[in-house]
Image (cartoon, rainbow, N blue to C red):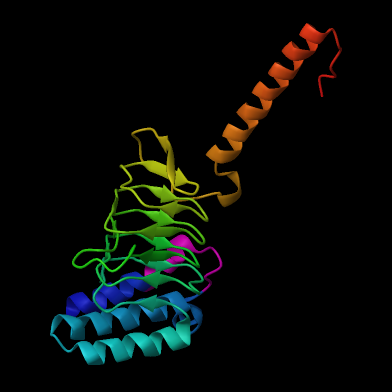
Amino acid sequence: MRKFFSLLKDDVKVVFDQDPAARNTFEVLLTYSGVHAVWAHRFAHGFHKRNMKFIARVISQVSRFFTGIEIHPGAKIGRRFFIDHGMAVVIGETCEIGDNVTLYQGVTLGGTGKEKGKRHPTLKDNVLVATGAKVLGSITIEEHSKIGAGSVVLKDVPKHSTVVGIPGRVVVQNGVKVSKNLDHHKMPDPVQEHCNRLEGRIKELEKELAKLKGVSVDDD
């Protein structure tokens, strides 16, 4: 029981570590839907482990109604798990989430079909998943990695990596700890970079063709 209440205390403390808008404990206890959803899940998961799955699902659905966050009672969640804002977050039954993990609103940790067994992602310690990202299937996001806003991740992500795009691509992997202060608007866009390279190549070809025809071409 002492360990359980220690978990709940950590769930409040991490809000102050991650959210500069948090002003006092009373406000967090009453107004943070992410905290409410995590606490409800911890109760539901306890019933789920004791094979009281109907009660667990009822708790889960009541929590979903009030918070907008759906966490299956079977999901395994570590310490200091933080859901920022939280609306439309979905966490599947066989998800495994480590310590110090942060999710933003609209994140889905889901499956890819009707497969059995382990069919949802595993997020290791210190992972951050940004707004609207989808992490799908029985894949592993290793420690200290970031998933950029709106990304769709279908493959394993190595340690200390940053992933963006659809499908998700690793764009940063430097072998050192990655800060969790994610600037969503500064994330690199590999698709746009590729388009820029193609545009530059087209301009070069147009110039070469113009030279062959003896016609001048504007540089812009």
Q: Residue furthest front?
A: 213
Q: Position of residue 130 (x, y in %)?
A: 48, 57
The image quarter in which residue 81 lies = bottom left
Total numbered circles: 0
Residue 81 versus residue 158: which sits nearer the camera? 158
Q: Is 61 or 185 nearer to us in this picture? A: 61
Query: Residue 46, percent across and down?
Result: 20, 82
Horizontally, residue 155 falls left or right of residue 197, namely left
Q: Of 111 and 19, which appears nearest the observer?
A: 111
Residue at (45, 54) in percent of width and height: 152
Q: Quadrant of the C terminus?
A: top right
Q: Is residue 147 magenta?
A: no
- Quadrant where the N terminus is found in the figure: bottom left
Q: Position of residue 27 (x, y in %)?
A: 51, 80
Residue at the image point whose x is 13% and y is 85% from the top: 50
Magenta stretch: give its range: 12-23
Q: Residue at x 48, y 72 (%)?
A: 86
Quadrant for residue 11, please give it: bottom left
Q: Is residue 69 visible?
A: yes
Going by the picture, which residue comes out furthest to the left? 50
Q: Is residue 197 above or below residue 182?
A: above
Residue 183 percent coordinates (x, y)? 55, 49
**Front residue of this view, candidates 73 and 39:** 73
Q: Quadrant of residue 163?
A: top left
Q: Is residue 150 above or below residue 85?
A: above
Q: Is residue 17 magenta?
A: yes
